[in-house]
Image: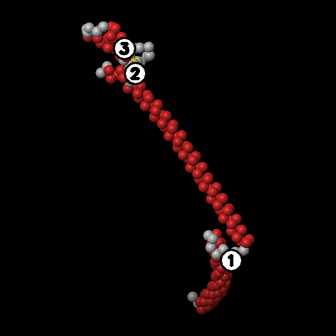
């Protein structure tokens, strides 16, 4: 490399460094201005929020019944109106929640009734399966499925060869109750 080339390279390097310095300086100036402006915005926002918090705390104290001495008649009426509005909203919400709860409970009640009906049907079907069928040897009275105990006693006396008169059994027949069909299974055992 010759001197000219080296000198040209150095000049170009100095030019690049100058441009870099100018650009860095400008950027620092913009950042400082933006930072300063941002800080001012945050300070203003902070002051607004602080004032808003003070107003809300003052209103809260008034609504809680504190520091009412300093309020004018109009401010007191406004406070009363706010309280009335809040109470109405609370009552509406409470009523809405109660109606929703009642509706849910009615749905649960209906579901439980349906389930109860299904279980009752299943129990009746199981009972039908477990009950013995009426036996053809048993004599029935006028009502289907009932057996007259007197007739049973009479049949037993005749089979056993006892000396029981028919008239006695018929009198006993009138005094003995009629047995329902579901009790037959216990007699035949």
Residue situated in front as seen by the camera: 27 or 8: 27
Between marks 1 and 2, how big is the CA–CA gap? 89 Å
Q: Which of marks 3 and 1 is in front?
A: 3
Q: What residue is at 41 percent from the left and 14 percent from the top?
A: 141
How crowded pointer 2 is (Cα within 10 Å; few <14, some 14-19, many 20+) is rated as few
**Which residue is the site of mark 2?**
180
- Where residue 80 appears, x then y in whole percent? 68, 66
Q: Which of marks 3 and 2 is in front?
A: 3
In the displayed structure, 84 sits above or below 22; it is above
**Which residue is the site of mark 3?**
173
The disc placed on residue 70 is 1
In the displayed structure, 3 sits above or below 107; it is below
Residue situated in front as seen by the camera: 60 or 39: 60
Q: Of marks 1 and 2, which one's residue comes earlier in the chain?
A: 1
Q: What residue is at 71 percent from the left and 68 percent from the top?
A: 77
Q: What residue is at 38 percent from the left and 14 percent from the top?
A: 174
């Amino acid at each position: 490399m010759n001197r000219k080339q080296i000198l040209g390279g150095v000049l170009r390097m100095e030019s690049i460094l100058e441009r870099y310095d100018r650009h860095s300086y400008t950027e620092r100036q913009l950042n400082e201005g933006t930072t300063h402006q941002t800080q001012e915005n945050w300070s203003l926002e902070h002051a607004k929020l602080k004032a808003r918090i003070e107003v809300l705390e003052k209103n809260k104290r008034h609504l809680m019944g504190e520091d009412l001495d300093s309020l004018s008649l109009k401010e007191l009426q406004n406070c009363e109106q706010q309280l009335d509005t809040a109470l109405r909203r609370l009552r509406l919400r409470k009523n809405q929640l109660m109606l929703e709860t009642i509706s849910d409970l009615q749905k649960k009640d209906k579901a439980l009734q349906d389930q109860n009906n299904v279980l009752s049907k299943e129990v009746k079907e199981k009972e039908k399966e477990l009950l013995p069928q009426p036996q053809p040897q048993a004599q029935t009275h006028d009502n289907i499925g009932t057996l007259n105990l007197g007739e049973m006693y009479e049949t037993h006396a005749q089979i056993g060869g006892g000396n029981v008169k028919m008239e006695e059994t018929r009198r006993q027949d009138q005094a003995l109750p009629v047995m329902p069909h579901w009790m037959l299974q216990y007699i035949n055992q």
